[in-house]
Amino acid sequence: MNHPSNENIPSRSFSYHAFNFTFLLLLAVFFISLYTVALLKSNSRITLSAAVERNISCSDAVHRAISSRLTRADFEQINTKSDMNSAQYRSLQSYLNELRSLNSTRYLYTAKRGPGGKPIYLIDGLDLEAPDFAYPGTYLEEEMAPYLEAALSGKTIHSQKIIDTTWGHIFTACYPVIASDGTNDILGALCIEIDMEDTYRSIEAINRSSFGIAAAASMIALLLIVISYFYTKKQKSRELTQQQLLEQTAKAAEAANKAKSTFLFNMSHDIRTPMNAILGYAELARNHLQEPEKIGEYMDKIHISGEKMLSIINNILQFSQIENNQIHIEETSIQTEKSFDSCIVMVQTALEEKQQHFHVTKDISYPYIYIDTTYMSEIVLNILSNAIKYTAKGGTISCALRQEPGETDGWCITEIAITDTGIGISEEFQSHIFESFSRERSSTVSGIEGTGLGMGIVKNLVDLMHGTIEVKSKLGEGSTFTVRIPCRISSREETEPTAFDETAAQTLSGCRILLAEDNDLNAEISIELLTREGLLVERANDGVACLEMLQKAPEDYYDLILMDIQMPIMDGYKATRAIRRFSDKKKAGIPIVAMTANAFTEDKERALESGMNDHVAKPIDMKVLMSVLEEQICGHKGL
Ligand code: ADP
């Protein structure tokens, strides 16, 4: 499973915060822009209505000044350009012109409905020589017609917005001219236009800037939408990835759980089988106490079953060590052929039992190499014992050792290929063979016992040794496993002779061991096995008894203490610490070896930390124990 690494967290949180900051900033700018646009709009409205108010007061004042002078004759007798010569026209025209130039009024004129009902100019207040001067009878521009129509229907009208005309931007006010002779006839209209160019420009300027701001706000809004879209998309894809990761984890956990259940199910069956044999044969032996031959046969079977159980337990132990990264490769210089032969020897009995043909070929180019011989043997033994296990009686097994130069100077590749003519492995299973707990057929189906851990352990060990393992197989025809390990080339001088040999028993003969062991059965077995090797053994039932016996004994009486760990009253660790604190320095320095069923690496480490010299796992492998005893006792005595 891929967890996000811690290194990624600060950078991701940084970009996340940066993103949030940018988003909020843009949002703030967007709202400020909107607010500014609203302010400008209201400002432009205020400017316009103030200008309109001002113009209304102005035009009303002009209307008041002029209205008393307008008579029925001014509207009825002036109709065409020829009427401009009349004194009546001239006097009114010059009055209107005067009034126009007195204030900001741009234009003053009188009008009425002409022939055909369309409004026409009567008296124009512009200078007579002005290019846009309108003669009496000229039709009014269309944009002004609605105002005039309103006035002619008796209503006073003021434009509330800026009117865009050919003369520019203006305000207009049109007043009806009512006959003062009591008839109340609407004679025509008086219209006043006021220049609104400045107001128009300032409103335009406001509009332009609010347009710019509105455009910017829209851009920001668009940007915000795009950012939100991509952020949501990214968030969704992140959520999706997380969900997929969770699903994968759940699936993996489910698969692991299933594998564990299958393993426990198979395990209980596979442990029960040899257990059943041990108990069954022990029972049979009890019934035939007087028949030594039968007892011998049953004992052999009990031994075989015991070994099977031990191999299962060892596999589980090693698997857990691999799982906890507790396996460390220790390379020592070894003799290639000798180390290879010692593996072959170990499977000899099994081969003979199944009457299988065995071919060995050796092509040794580098007689001395650096390798972790314990784990290399374990790899070869696991593959070899599977070859024997999954090949029928009378089948053939070949084991080929070959070496070739490595990629780097001073290195070589040691290759071991093991071929059998057994049941073979299906192509589908070949891709799962190195997974822990995986078996092609359960013990119930195949009748062959196993944990499904061996190949997983082999693969892990090969990986730790930076090597490769390859399997080629065909169902019903057999399999070939090829292991290739890169090794540093060594020499005879760098290689130590093998530590333990048969002479160890002679060296140790007569040595006295103090055995601290609370379990009677274990004590009996240990005493029997050690005595058979010529050692003298005295037993203490717990840590305290062990201390007392050592204290009371004469100097150099005991050569070594074999210390169990879990004991009542005082355990092995405490007893060892107490011994190391003895004032008698000789007794305090006695070699102490832990002999315990606590076989994990951390148990060994704890034993050494408490002051013990070495650690041997139960059940006792006499070869291992004798080698340790020889090393400790001889080392202590300086032999
Ligand atoms: P097991 O304890 O079941 O033998 P391993 O991990 O050693 O477990 O092997 C896993 C599985 O691989 C075995 O159960 C078997 O199905 C298959 N296998 C391994 N070696 C061989 C072989 N030489 N021939 C046929 N099948 C094999």
Image (tube, rainbow, N blue to C red):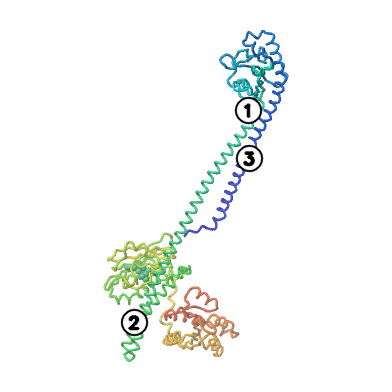
Q: Among all residues in the image, which is located at the extreme bottom? A: 290
Label 1 or label 2, whichever lies nearer to me, is: 1
Q: Of the residues shown, which amino acid type is indicated by label 3?
A: Tyr
Residue 361 visible (yes or no): no
Q: Disc 1 versus disc 2: distance between alpha carbons?
A: 117 Å
Crowding at mark 2 (Cα within 10 Å: few <14, some 14-19, many 20+): some
The residue located at (40%, 67%) in the rendering is 259
Label 1 or label 3, whichever lies nearer to me, is: 1
Q: Which residue was labeled with disc 2?
A: 301
Disc 1 residue: CB within 8 Å of ligand 1 = no
Q: Position of residue 556 (x, y in %)?
A: 53, 87
Residue 305 vertical position relative to residue 250 in the rendered view, above or below = below
Q: Disc 2 versus disc 3: distance between alpha carbons?
A: 96 Å
Q: Which residue was labeled with disc 1?
A: 161
- Nearer to the camera, 167 or 462: 167
- Nearer to the camera, 409 or 442: 442
Q: Among all residues in the image, which is located at the extreme left? A: 394
Q: Position of residue 381 (x, y in %)?
A: 37, 71
Q: Of the residues shown, which amino acid type is indicated by label 2?
A: Lys
Crowding at mark 1 (Cα within 10 Å: few <14, some 14-19, many 20+): some
Q: Which residue was labeled with disc 3?
A: 35
- Mark 1 and mark 3 lie on one chain; the one further toward the N terminus is 3
Query: Circle 3 — which element?
Result: helix
The residue located at (51%, 46%) in the rendering is 230
Residue 272 vertical position relative to residue 437 in the rendered view, above or below = below
Disc 2 residue: CB within 8 Å of ligand 1 = no
- Mark 1 and mark 2 lie on one chain; the one further toward the N terminus is 1
